[in-house]
């Protein structure tokens, strides 16, 4: 009987592999789950092996933040419409952060931003400055847009529904105990808005983002 094939050789450790493992750990357990021991377990190695590639946990946190920034789409050098560029970046940031919402509390807290983080901020500021935003207005715009993206991701993650069926189930449960005569406006919102065919809460992101971009355009000069 032929002997079974040998197991595939273990992929050697690298800084990128350590950071990828740390992101998987955080995706499952939040940023608090990132420890040298748990990242090593994710890779099937001893914790001491990690120190050949990252000096400490802080370096891992710096690295995963930079990896998240690297995953967000940046406006290209040929972007001519600042609104289109910032909107595309906002949608990309929301998609990435929805997958890695634990990163929201880290992204502005690190003292040693990596190269992808620095390129990201420079590219976004470049779009705004080339569009005629003054330096203070560019700072206001970045703060406003990023606060909106982060807040929406947190709110969306906290909602007790993710599909239209979920919306109907949650709404039915609320309406069952809702004193509709006493709370007519809330009843109206649920019945005539949230329960309308085709309603999708995620469309609120588009609407709010357009309001912000309209306001920034009005003050761009």
Image (tube, rainbow, N blue to C red):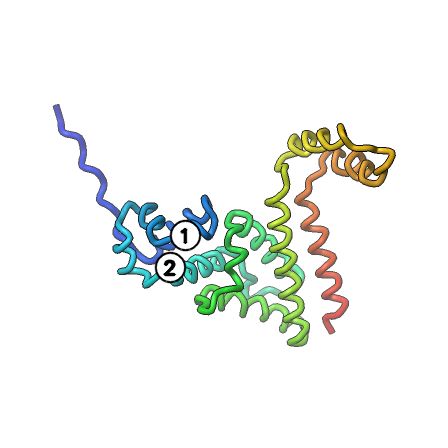
51 sits to left or right of 94: left
Residue drawn at 53 percent across, 57 percent down: 105
Residue drawn at 47 percent across, 49 percent down: 30
Residue drawn at 45 percent across, 45 percent down: 29
Q: Position of residue 123 (x, y in %)?
A: 55, 67
- Dot 2, crowdedness within 10 Å: few (<14), some or many (≥20)? some
- Dot 1, crowdedness within 10 Å: few (<14), some or many (≥20)? many
Residue drawn at 44 percent across, 66 percent down: 114
> Is 208 drawn above or below residue 121 in the view shown?
above
Q: Which residue is mark 2?
A: 57
Nearest the viewer among 121 and 57 is 57
- Quadrant housing residue 221: bottom right
41 sits to left or right of 152: left
Q: Position of residue 64 (x, y in %)?
A: 43, 57
Q: Secondary structure at mark 2?
A: helix
Q: Which residue is mark 1?
A: 34
Residues marked 2 and 1 touching at CB (< 8 Å): yes
Nearest the viewer among 43 and 177 is 177
- Quadrant housing residue 145: bottom right
132 sits to left or right of 70: right
> Is 171 drawn above or below residue 18 in the view shown?
above
Query: How far apart are the two marked residues, 2 and 1, measured between alpha carbons?
Result: 8 Å
Q: Quadrant of the N terminus?
A: top left
Q: Earlier in the sequence, mark 2 or mark 1?
A: 1
Q: Position of residue 117 (x, y in %)?
A: 49, 65
Q: Which mark is residue 89?
A: none
Residue that extends furthest to the right in the rendered view of this protein:
181
Q: Secondary structure at mark 1?
A: loop
């Amino acid at each position: 009987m032929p002997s079974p094939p040998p197991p595939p050789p273990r992929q050697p450790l690298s800084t990128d592999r350590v950071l990828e493992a740390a992101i998987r750990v955080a995706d499952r357990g939040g940023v608090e789950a990132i420890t040298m021991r748990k990242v090593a377990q994710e890779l099937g190695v001893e914790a001491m092996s990690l120190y050949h590639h990252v000096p400490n946990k802080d370096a891992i946190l710096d690295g995963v933040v930079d990896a998240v920034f690297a995953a967000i789409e940046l406006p290209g050098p040929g972007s001519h419409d600042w609104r289109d560029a910032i909107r595309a970046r906002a949608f990309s940031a929301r998609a990435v952060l929805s997958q890695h919402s634990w990163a929201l509390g880290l992204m502005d807290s690190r003292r040693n931003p990596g190269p992808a983080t620095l390129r990201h901020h420079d590219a976004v500021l470049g779009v705004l400055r080339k569009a005629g935003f003054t330096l203070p207005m560019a700072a206001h715009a970045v703060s406003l847009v990023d606060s909106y993206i982060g807040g929406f991701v947190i709110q969306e993650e906290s909602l007790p529904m993710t599909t239209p069926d979920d919306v109907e189930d949650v709404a039915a449960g609320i309406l069952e105990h809702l004193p509709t005569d006493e709370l007519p406006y809330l009843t109206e919102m649920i019945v005539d808005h949230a329960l309308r065919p085709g309603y999708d809460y995620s469309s609120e992101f588009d609407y709010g983002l357009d309001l912000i971009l309209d306001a920034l355009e009005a003050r761009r000069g």
